[in-house]
Image (cartoon, rainbow, N blue to C red):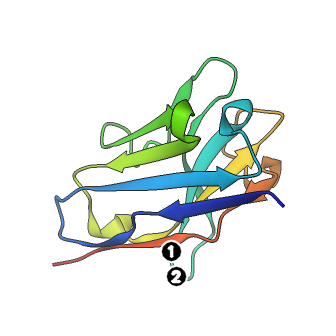
Amino acid sequence: QARLVESGGGLVQPGGSLTLSCASSGLTLDYYTIGWFRQAPGKEREGVSYISSSDGTTYYADSVKGRFTISRDSAKNTVYLQMNSLKPEDTAVYYCAADISGTSLEVYEYDYWGQGTQVTVSS
């Protein structure tokens, strides 16, 4: 059964950095557009970034542009989200997801989801 597993979340001070990982068993992530999403308490899930399967095109939400970087390691079948200059408003549960057929940050487009990892930015 295909699974996505996120790791790397934690507590960090404002201005700090974290790197999230998204690994899979059962899916070859190179064949999928991989998106990172986040959901803060009381808010809807929002798209943060994606990396496409076809040519590695990346996209970032305006709120994270210039601070977050998404990347793939095909040999490790893992996608990363490097998060720098973190702000308290980045606090959320972060999810990775896989989309076989498109390139977007629409939640409904994604076919597989991980269980999420908590990121808390606080002093």
Residue 40, labelled with which disc? 1
Q: Do the residues labelled 1 and 2 touch (CB within 8 Å)?
A: yes
| C-alpha separation, residue under disc 1 versus residue under disc 2 | 4 Å
Q: Is residue 11 left or right of residue 75?
A: left
User: How many C-alpha atoms fall within 10 Å of the one at disc 2: few (<14), some, or many (≥20)?
Assistant: few
Of the pair 75 and 5, the residue shown nearer to us: 75
x, y percent for residue 72: 51, 34
Residue 41, labelled with which disc? 2
Q: At 65% from the left edge and 52% from the top edge, which residue is drawn?
A: 24
Q: Is mark 1 on a helix, strand or loop?
A: loop
Q: At 66% from the left edge and 58% from the top edge, which residue is drawn?
A: 4
Q: Which quadrant of the rendered structure holds the N terminus?
A: bottom right
x, y percent for residue 110: 77, 50
Q: In which quarter of the image is residue 103?
A: top right
Residue 69, labelled with which disc? none
Q: Is mark 2 on a helix, strand or loop?
A: loop
x, y percent for residue 66: 31, 36
User: What number of labels is visible?
Assistant: 2
Q: Residue furthest top?
A: 55
Above or below residue 5? Residue 108 is above
Q: In which quarter of the image is residue 123?
A: bottom left
User: How many C-alpha atoms fall within 10 Å of the one at disc 1: few (<14), some, or many (≥20)?
Assistant: some
Kind of residue indicated by mark 1: Ala
Kind of residue indicated by mark 2: Pro
Above or below residue 77? Residue 22 is below
